[in-house]
Image: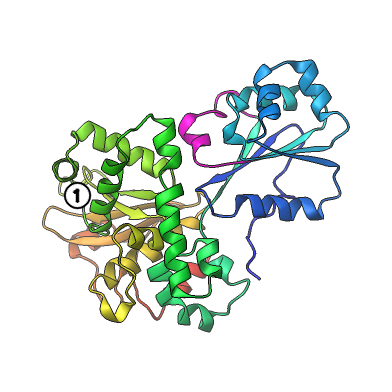
Amino acid sequence: MLKRQISLKSNIQKNKVLIIYGARRVGKTTLLNNFLENTSLKYKLDNGDNIRLQELLQSQDFNRIKDYVEGYQLIAIDEAQQIPNIGMALKIIVDQVKDIQVIVTGSSSFDLSQQVGEPLTGRKKTLVLYPFSQSEMKTKYNNHELREKLDDFLVFGSYPDVVLAKTKEEKINILNELVDSYLLKDVLALDNIKFSKKLLDLLKSLAFQVGNLVSLNELSQQVGLDVKTVDKYLDLLEKGFVIKRLGGFSRNLRNEITNKSKYYFLDNGIRNSLISQFNYLDKRDDIGALFENFVIIDKMKNNNLISNYYFWRNYEGKEIDLIEEKEGKLSAYEFKWNKFKAEAPKNFIDNYKDSKFQVINKNNYLDFLLVS
C-alpha cells in the first residue's frame, strides 16, 4: 500500500492551524481521513461545501463559533477554500479556544486568494501535497520495481489515481479528466479569467518547451496575449501547482543568463495529456525532456526548503540543467537518458571551483532522487 511520508500527528499544535494544500486530486482528503481514523483526540470533521458551516464561519460571531467547537480537541475542515474569509474564522478559533487544534485542507486557491495569509500570521503551519514522489513509492516498491515502472512515470506521471489505475486506457481517462475538470479550476475562478482556451494554449506551448529557455515575448505571440498577461498567467499557474519555474543561477558574472526562465510541469502525465501524447518511450522523440522534467520535479518534491534550485547558462550557449545550492555548497547536474559521461562547461568550473558535477541517467537516477 502506498503511504504518504507526512505525519500529521507530529505537525499539529495547540492553538495553531495546520493547513494541508496542493493541487486537486493529490490525496489531501485521504491523508486527513487516515489520520482521523487513528487519532485518540475527540474531533469534529466538517466540509467547506456545507452551506450552514459557511454561514456560521462567515459570521465571525465569536459566541456561535465557540458553541460550534465546544467539547472538541480537534476541528478538521476539508475543502476549506470554499468558505469565504476562512482565515478570520480560523483566527477566532485558535485565539479564543484554549488548547484547540485545527486541521484544514484546501486546493491551491488558499494560496492564490491569500485567504489565510495575513489573518493567520504566526498561527499556522503549512504542508504542501504533490503527486507521489519516488521516495513515497518506496513504501510499496523496491528499487528494481521502481525502475521497471519508470516508463509509466515518465508518460503517465504519479497522481494517486493514475498510479493505482490498472490499464493504460484508465490512466489516460483519469489524466484527461484532471485536465478538463480540475487543472485550471482554481486559477480561472479566483482571478476572473474568462479565456480558459488561452491558458490551455499557453500550457501546450510550454509543454513543447520543457528544458528550454522560455521567452515571454515568443509565448505572447504564440498565444495572442500581451507579455504582462502571459507573465501573470505563468505566476498563477505556478501557484496553482501546474508548472514550476526554474530561474538562472549567477553570482554577478556578466556572461551568465538570468533574465529568462525554464518551466517544468509538476506532473509528467498532465504535460502529456495537454498535448495528447501517451505513446511509450520507444515511439517518442521527447524522451530527454520527459526524463529531465520527471527527475527535476521529483527532486524538488522532497526539498523541504533545504535547497535552492536553478539552471545555469552563459551567452556562449554553455549550459547545465540543474544547480542545487545547499548550505552554501553547489552541486551541478546534467540529465541524459542514455549518456553516462559528460563534462561541465569550463567557464562554470573556472568560476565555481568548489562545485561538484554529475551526470544523471536512467541507471543512477534513483540514487539521486532517494538521497536526502
**For this view, does 51 lie left or right of residue 162?**
right
Asked if residue 113 is among those painted magenta in the image, a careful observer would answer yes
Q: Quadrant of the N terminus?
A: bottom right
Colour scheme used in the picture? rainbow
Q: Residue at x 50, y 65 (%)?
A: 162
Considering every residue shown, the one lying at the far right of the view is 71
Count of numbered badges drawn on the protein: 1
The answer to whether 234 appears left or right of 241 in the picture is left
> Would you identify the image quadrant in which residue 125 lies?
top right
How far across and down, in percent of the image, does residue 42 sit? 86, 42
Crowdedness of circle 1 by 10 Å Cα count: few (<14), some, many (20+)?
Answer: many
Q: Position of residue 15 (x, y in %)?
A: 75, 31
Where residue 362 sits, quadrant-wise, is bottom left
Q: Which residues are magenta?
A: 105-122
Q: Position of residue 337 (x, y in %)?
A: 31, 76
**Image quadrant occupied by the C terminus:** bottom right
Locate residue 33 relative to residue 336 in the image: left or right.
Answer: right
Question: Relative to the observer, which residue lies in front, 169 or 57?
Answer: 169
The picture places residue 130, in percent across and down from the top left corner, at 51, 54
Tell me where residue 286 sits by quadrant.
bottom left
Q: Which residue is mark 1?
A: 256
Q: What's the residue at 21%, 42% (across, down)? A: 259
Overall secondary structure of the magenta section: loop
Residue occupying image coordinates x 47% and y 82%: 148
Residue occupying image coordinates x 46% and y 34%:
112
Say if residue 167 shows up in the picture.
yes
Judge left or right: residue 48 versus residue 46: left
Residue 112 magenta-drawn? yes
Indicate the amino acid at tag 1: Glu
Q: Is residue 370 above or below residue 257?
A: below
Q: Residue furthest left?
A: 316
